[in-house]
Amino acid sequence: MTKWLSLSIAPDIDHDADVVFACGDGALIGASACIERAEEARRAARFEALPGSWLDVIGEFGEARIVIVSVETAQAPRDRWLAAGGRLVDAMRALRISAVRLPKGEHLGDPSAIKWLFLGALLHGYRLHQERAAVEGAFRPTSLVITGDDQAAADEAIRVATAINRARAWTEQPANLLTPAVFAQEAASALERYGVTVTTLGAAELEQIGMGGLLAVGRSSEHEPKLVVAEWRGASERTGWDAALVGKGVTFDGGGLNIKTRPIIEKMKFDMGGAAAVLGALELAASRKAPVNVVAIVPMAENVIDGRAMRPGDVIRMMSGLTVEIGNTDAEGRLLLADGVTYAINHYQPRNVVDVATLTGMITGVLHEEYAGLYASDDGLADALLHAGNATSELLWRMPLVATQDYLVESSVADLANVGASGFLGLGYGSPAAGAKFIERFARGTAWAHIDIAGTAWATRRTPRSQPGATGYGVALLDAWLDGLGHRHAD
């Protein structure tokens, strides 16, 4: 079972220090009994509330220890307190403090600030539990101590952080430990506790339904491909399905016969970040009893090599009946997504389909780590997703998707190619537009959007919500979008 470490939040437990927050405008926020000593220590140390700074205040005998943590007031309120939670965890690690007592939420000046503070601490306190002997006894912060008045905000932060951190842990888990079968089993375990119905199809069942894209990608691995179908019916009085979320679940992408090279190949355990995002979003929706009907479709496979591997130049038949020329075996994610979109439309006829994938390296060169690329066939769907991204700080940038780009997936021997003309124009198989145009052919008139998270699924630097590593990007964004769908139906 994939496990991770994080902090606990509880009232009335032993603690090693009290926390006071120092704002850039000079204000101190904390328990009234601590403010006077904190102010005196700040003046004596000439402490300035600069980004990432803190001050350790050791009192005389009988006096409580105080940690002053800076708050970056130039940031928007949400990011300000997410970052403050992270900086608090940094201070606890550096000062080897196990448990700290926080000021009451009512003292922070914003009713939602305490939830973001808790969430920032829980996200920055995350570590994948790797069971390494060298760190078994290493120090780590354990607890935030709160008043009972803030328990509801703590519970909400724990609910959200659990789903995001689970997605991060899956994304960081080595591929030999997170095979398609293990991933499918853990997804079911995580979701069924909230009333989600989870079905897993194996290779024999995928053959019966003709899921040729997923089978072609996964047939060369000793670990057979899987299809996970997770249904949440939060509006059971309605018969239709509001949305289908399709996530790319390539648990390891070696590139197939077009093998990847160093240094990127060792990172390719993260190529199921899209699957982790849609499963995490479904967990959040189900855990809050979202009044929507949504299904997550997650094709899972390894893209590796043996004598059965698909070859460049092969022509395969997809679940939709369309034939595809394989121009490059490393353009495999779009094959999984196309079959997943087809399955969603055939079985659920959803009003909206959104697929999420670490699809192309080129999107990283365009949007870097700040934005995920958004392609959409429907302006209303695109606008709703952009709004959800802004609301959660998981930002999207809409990219052009027009009929004149169809040549990017043209083939002379099949209905389309997974690498078409883009490969001959110096764009390479990593063209984000080519990947989107390929998947679009399988949406068949349904309102559809594709989110390329190759740049946002993994952080190389610290952000207000994450340390370097897997970010869990998309979990909060998709849940916020689903929340908007629920509100529209309620209205």
Image (cartoon, grey):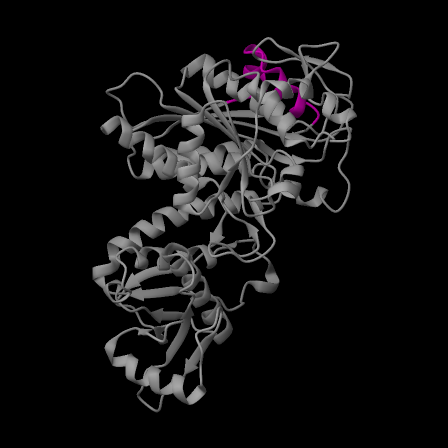
Whether residue 194 is visible, yes or no, is: no
How far across and down, in percent of the image, does residue 462 sit? 54, 58
As drawn, 197 above or below 407: below
Give percent across and percent down for residue 115: 32, 55
The quadrant in which residue 436 appears is top right
Q: Kindly indicate the quadrant of the structure image that contains residue 17.
A: bottom left
Q: Nearer the viewer, residue 180 or 374?
A: 374
User: Residue drawn 40% across and 49% down?
Assistant: 161
Q: Is residue 326 magenta?
A: no
Image quarter hosting the C terminus: top left
Q: Is residue 83 left or right of residue 313?
A: left
Q: What number of labels is visible? A: 0
Q: In percent of the image, x 51 and y 13: which residue is there?
A: 444
Give whichever of 95, 86 is nearer the camera.
86
Residue 472 vs 300, above or below: the answer is below
Position of residue 472 relative to residue 196, above or below, is below
Q: Where does residue 390 sit, x and y in percent of width and height?
A: 42, 44
Front residue of this view, candidates 38 and 60: 38
Q: Main secondary structure of the magenta part?
A: helix
Give the residue displayed 78% in from the left and 23% down from the top. Answer: 307
Magenta segment: 201-220
Task: For residue 29, say whether it is visible.
Answer: yes
Left or right for 185, reference 264: left
Question: Which residue is painted at 34% across and 73% down in the image?
Answer: 15
